[in-house]
Image (cartoon, rainbow, N blue to C red):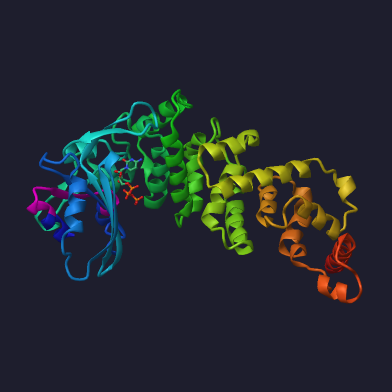
Amino acid sequence: MDWLATIAMAHGLHLSVVGGAVRDRLLGKSTPDKDLDLVVEGDGSWSWPAIQLLELIENHELPRGFQLKQSQSFEAFGTAQLHLQTPEGPLLCDLSSARSERYAFPGAHPEVKPADLLNDLKRRDFSINAIAERLPLSSNPLLDPFAGEADLKAGQLKLLHPLSLEDDPSRLLRGVRYGTRLGLELAAETTAQVDSTLAAWPWTNDAPALASRSRMELELLLSESCWRSAVELLESWRGLELIQRGWKALPPRSSAWLQRLGQWGHAIDPNWSAEELRLVGLLWLVPHQYNLVAIAKRLQLAHRQQQLLSRGLELQRWLEGLSPQNTDAWKASDWTFALEERGAKTEPLMVLMPLGPSRHLQFRRPLLRWLMCWRLIESPLSAKELMNQGLSAGPKLGSRLKELRGQAINQHA
Ligand code: CTP
């Protein structure tokens, strides 16, 4: 990206690569970057040099093979984004003006002001993410004021400063992601910071930024290829406590269930991705489900994810009220109509929820049979065929269709 640095330098701006791209290069990764975090330092004439650079690029001819597909700026934070097409594929550049940050309370939106690169590195989460390479690459040494490279080599995940986690507790979830992906262990002082920060939870101030950041971090974590190990690490590094206070442990076989939930759910309804179902599933596992819907709301889950949780809860409460003595005699059609009366026909995924680990084992079989088979069985005769046989449209036709479908389901079972 030296051409970008050349445009910047011609206007008194300095560009550095930070974060993931530097870290991955130090680990020997040689595949082309898909996203780059670039810090822009200015000469003081513009308050936000990243926005100045964006304007320069928008009005500049790019080198052969490069194309600016889309760009946006975020004035309030002094940041901008470039979506580029490059000879090596699409590249997302996050430009941020070198800045220092102050958090008024845990999880607040930071108050930011222009600063130099060193101060910009100081505000970051972990030592392994506070390494910069000034551009052009060939002529500049690594800037690694917090010995991030040494931590990376020693397999240590170290929070950068004593307020790192208090400033933004969602960094614990980021840490779990790095810990899993890069095989890192928590440094002793970082463990101590996790303990002291969690001891102060919930924080007195309302922190809407924290909730949405935590959700985004959970989404990323559950999208990692090694998400099953990440879920285990989330438990052992106390990350579950950010979801529900005092949540220490997952039920046995949780990750196997999350795996099935994602796989089956996506197969049943391809409009859902396995990742988003896993997030719903993780929340489903909270020990005290009475505030499950409130947690989902607080984390700002998508409406349909919230809906799936509340429909799952309704279904579960109904199942809890059933006694096996009464349902022993239920035929496949009785189960089918009872589930479908509760909305399962249009939202079949809700039936996956009460199948979570250690719940309703006695009803497992009919729920699974409905999901895999009974729900797909139709009446052998259609409404039209019944009308051709002389039945007129109306409730009688409806009950006949239901009766025929019930018979077909019972024959199949
Ligand atoms: N960062 C931070 N605190 C956060 C989020 C981000 O300090 N809560 C800083 C980190 O220095 C991080 C950089 O912003 O390196 C860019 O963030 P992000 O793009 O989320 O992470 P990457 O470092 O690119 O890591 P990856 O994409 O591989 O997860």
Check the picture and name the quadrant holding the C terminus: bottom right
Q: Is residue 286 left or right of residue 314?
A: left
Check the picture and name the quadrant holding the N terminus: bottom left
Q: Residue at x 90, y 70 (%)?
A: 391
User: Where's residue 135, x and y in %?
Assistant: 14, 53
Determine if the magenta segment contains residue 95: no
Determine if the magenta segment contains residue 17: yes
Query: In the rendered image of this protein, does residue 403 appear above or below residue 340?
Result: below
Q: Quadrant of residue 60?
A: bottom left
- Choose between 2 and 43: the one closer to the eye: 43
User: Where's residue 166, x and y in %?
Assistant: 37, 29
Q: In which quarter of the image is residue 7?
A: bottom left
Magenta residues, as a range?
8-21
User: Where's residue 34, x and y in %?
Assistant: 31, 60
Is residue 146 at least partly visible in the picture?
no
Q: In this view, does 390 lie to the left or right of 63?
A: right
User: Where's residue 404, x and y in %?
Assistant: 87, 67
Query: In the rendered image of this protein, does residue 62 appear above or below residue 16?
Result: below
